[in-house]
Image (spheres, rainbow, N blue to C red):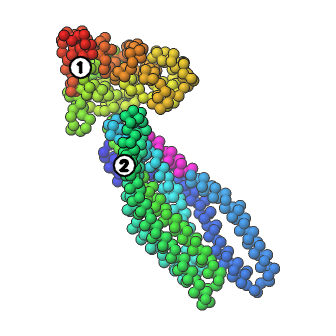
Amino acid sequence: MGKAKQKQLKKKGSIRRYMEFVKPYKKQILLTVFVGIIKFSIPLGLPLLYKYIIDNLLDNQTVPLAERSKELAYLIGAGFFVFLVIKPPLEYIRQYLAQWSASKILFDVRNRLFDHVQKLSLRFYSNTKTGEVISRIINDVEQTKDFVVTGLMNLWLDMITILIAIAIMWTIDPKLTLVAIIPLPFYALAVKFFYGRLRSLTRDRSAALAELQGHLTERVNGMAVIRSFALEPHENQAFKKQNDGFLTAALRQTNWNARTYVVVSTITDFAPILIFGAAAFLVLNGQESLGTMVAFIAYIDRLYAPLGRLVNSSTTLTQSIASMDRMFEFLDEPYDITEKANARNPVHVKGNVQFENISFSYEEGGERAIDRLTLDVQAGERIAFVGMSGGGKSTLVSLIPRFYDVSSGRITLDGVDIRDLKLRGLRDQIGMVMQESILFSESVEMNIKMGNPEATDEEVIAAAKAANAHEFIERLPDGYKTPVGERGVKLSGGQKQRLAIARVFLKNPPILILDEATSALDLESESMIQDSLARLAKGRTTFTVAHRLSTITDADKIVVIENGQITEMGRHEELMRKRGAYFELYAIQNLELVE
């Protein structure tokens, strides 16, 4: 996302931006409000009914009792019909439409956020806790549901209910109506005074909750480390500190919210006494009927109940908008890797890759991880990157699929700058097997199909056989349908790597990246996986980041990387004869070479 676009979006404000998600469902929302108006208008007729019964039936001796009793029975029967037959279906329709609309909007918002999550760079994830990302997508988005239900529906219904109530009261008695609305300006002042600060405190609370969730997610994922080092007491204190931070933020918000409630409830309690006193005084002086007084007392609830909901809605909306702010703050997180408007898909890829005087820094202006590196790789060549840890090997291969972009220079694929290619099209040409294979908790079959979701069962089995994985898969309780557990916890390291290799076989890309794919395995697993990797690399341009140098002695070109630069390059035999940096690295792992 470009900087100009981000500034333009921020100017629009969270509510206006959120309304873009609301627009597709505006008809359903308007229908919900319309049905709600009918439903809420029905009870507004009750005080008029009370007034009529008291003044015309109970307190009217000029009409015969039998006639009054018959009319009363008809009125009561009509009331039962309206409230038992007409009102319940209206309430069901209103509730269903409201929840349906809100759920659909949240569905769309989360889809947009997940799409955004997939476009964020690895740099973002290296600086952000997983739990914080999850909190934005789950907790903050869920909070915005109140904006839809309360802000776009109930808020308008309550306002319309208040206006209708005031209009009816005005037709009955303008003087009493003026008395009834005296407290309204005080409500407005209370809302204006309290809710700006409440929004800020609510954002702080949400941020503290996200921090707590991020800490908890990390600790749950690292439970094996905590137990192996007996860190439970230390981690209890660390969690208590994080929890205290959330508690402090929550109590600050609660304190301010409680002050708001005290002020608002005081006004609410004061209003009925004021109206009752004024109405009673008029009745005593013969200026109003008893029925009018009862009607006005009934309208107090009809007026101040929605008014109270409006004030409570202000709290709810404040919390919702604060979550909305955080949601869009996350959605505005810029993309380090962007696609040009005229980017094209690669066609008939051979696999020639050139690094042309490239440099790269993880932070702008920071130390260079890759420094003015040039390398020409022909299609089908097997290139091995070796060197001490931190030299820039893994960084270099991560630039090929554009997990990061070079700071200067360029990388080309078959002569085309990779920044001129569509991201998906570029990455479709690359298969990767990393040191730690990431598997999802679903079935073995699903994890292999990550290489090609449209693959047939026969193609999945063929890929597993090529990766030396078919035999162990067949021994699993449900074969290819067996769930592997979160991050593949039910499988050994070697088994996970073979599934990762099967995934790449299924993808069948022209370029292969192996980033220390066997460094964490035992010798037996390594031997089996090296066999499958050799088959996988055949005919492909292959980049291997090697920890064990004995596994790359047959590479077409071995490249020694030190401090982001190439210090040596050649075949194994050539580099051994030079007795330089590669010889020293090889000798460390093969002590018999040391003189």
Residue 226, how many percent across, how many down? 39, 36
The question of residue 161 being in magenta is answered with no
Residue 411: name its quadrant. top left
Picture mark count: 2
How many neighbours does mark 1 have within 10 angstroms: few (below 14), some (14-19), or many (20 or more)? many
Front residue of 374/564: it is: 564
How many neighbours does mark 2 have within 10 angstroms: few (below 14), some (14-19), or many (20 or more)? few
Bounds of the magenta segment: 100-115
CA–CA distance between discs 2 and 1?
46 Å
Is residue 216 rendered to the left or right of residue 303? left
Q: Amino acid at mark 2?
A: Lys
Residue 504: name its quadrant. top left
Q: Is residue 14 visible?
A: no
Front residue of 74/573: it is: 573
Q: Is residue 16 above or below residue 587?
A: below
Instruction: Give the quadrant of the N terminus.
Output: top left
Is residue 297 rendered to the left or right of residue 186? right
Q: Residue furthest right?
A: 66
Residue 236, how many percent across, how many down? 40, 44
The residue under the point 71% across, 62% down is 84
Q: Is residue 577 above or below residue 68?
A: above
Could you say which disc has been placed on residue 560 in the image?
A: 1
The residue under the point 47% across, 24% down is 491
Could you say which disc has been placed on residue 314 in the image?
A: none
Q: Is residue 345 above or below residue 305?
A: above
Question: Reading the chain from its start, which is encountered first: label 2 or label 1?
Answer: 2
Instruction: Give the quadrant of the C terminus.
Output: top left
Q: Secondary structure at mark 1?
A: strand
The question of residue 111 being in magenta is answered with yes
Residue 192, how many percent across, how many down? 40, 67
Could you say which disc has been placed on residue 241 in the image?
A: 2
Q: Main secondary structure of the magenta part?
A: helix
